[in-house]
Image (spheres, rainbow, N blue to C red):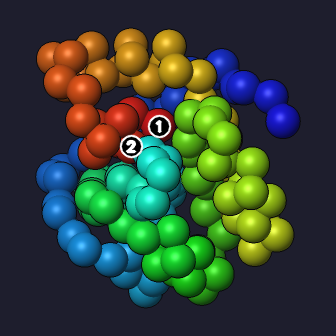
């Protein structure tokens, strides 16, 4: 697995919606996740350009939802938790991108005035 450096297609966001779970009935362009020890923060970009943010989603809930989602792109920073998760996501038909930490920091600086939070990290991916 290698860290990918690339430029992303910028999709204008109409609004940022807070949610507690992943709506598996929606189609997503991409899902950015910020991995932590016991949970993840996720920013899900819908095909309509809306950003749905979930703070503190259990790994079991993420895996359950990922199994039923149509194939999409998951993006995350490299860390120890990601290898196992990437294997599972790819087995379920999803594409996984590993985004370097410098790219995430640069995005947060330019789009969130340097406010580093788990949700901003997830959206930066």
* Image point (66%, 19%), residue name: 5
Q: Residue 49, how many percent across, how many down?
A: 32, 54
All told, the count of numbered labels is: 2
Q: CA distance from mark 1 to mark 2?
A: 5 Å
Give residue 125's mark: 1
Which quadrant would residue 41 be assigned to in this image?
bottom left
- Quadrant of the rendering where the N terminus is positioned: top right
Work out whether 73 lies above or below 57: above
Q: Which residue matches tag 2? A: 122
Residue 42: quadrant of the picture: bottom left
Q: Is residue 86 left or right of residue 102?
A: right
**Residue drawn at the location 44% of the way across and 24% of the way down:** 104
SS type, badge 2? helix
- Residue 75 locus on image (x, y percent): 57, 44
Say above or below: 95 vs 20.
above
The residue located at (30%, 41%) in the rendering is 118
Residue at (75% x, 74% y) in the render: 92
Query: Around disc 2, counting alpha carbons within 10 Å, would you say few (fewer than 14), some (14 to 19), or many (20 or more)?
Result: many
- Judging depth in this view, the residue of 32 and 63 nearest the camera is 63
Circles 1 and 2, Cβ within 8 Å, touching? The answer is yes
Q: Nearer the viewer, residue 103 or 36?
A: 36
Front residue of 39 and 121: 39
Q: Is residue 99 placed above or below 36 in the rendered structure? A: above
Q: Is residue 54 left or right of residue 99?
A: left
Residue 77 % position (x, y): 56, 34
């Amino acid at each position: 697995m290698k860290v990918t450096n690339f430029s992303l297609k910028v999709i204008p966001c109409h609004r940022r919606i807070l949610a507690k779970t992943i709506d598996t009935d929606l189609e997503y362009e991409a899902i950015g996740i910020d991995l932590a020890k016991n949970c993840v923060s996720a920013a899900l970009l819908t095909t309509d350009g809306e950003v749905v943010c979930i703070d503190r989603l259990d790994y079991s809930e993420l895996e359950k939802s990922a199994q039923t989602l149509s194939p999409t792109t998951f993006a995350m920073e490299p860390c120890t938790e990601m290898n196992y998760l990437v294997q599972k996501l790819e087995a379920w038909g999803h594409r996984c991108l590993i985004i370097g930490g410098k790219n995430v920091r640069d995005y947060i600086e330019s789009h969130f005035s340097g406010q580093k939070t788990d949700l901003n990290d997830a959206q930066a991916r």
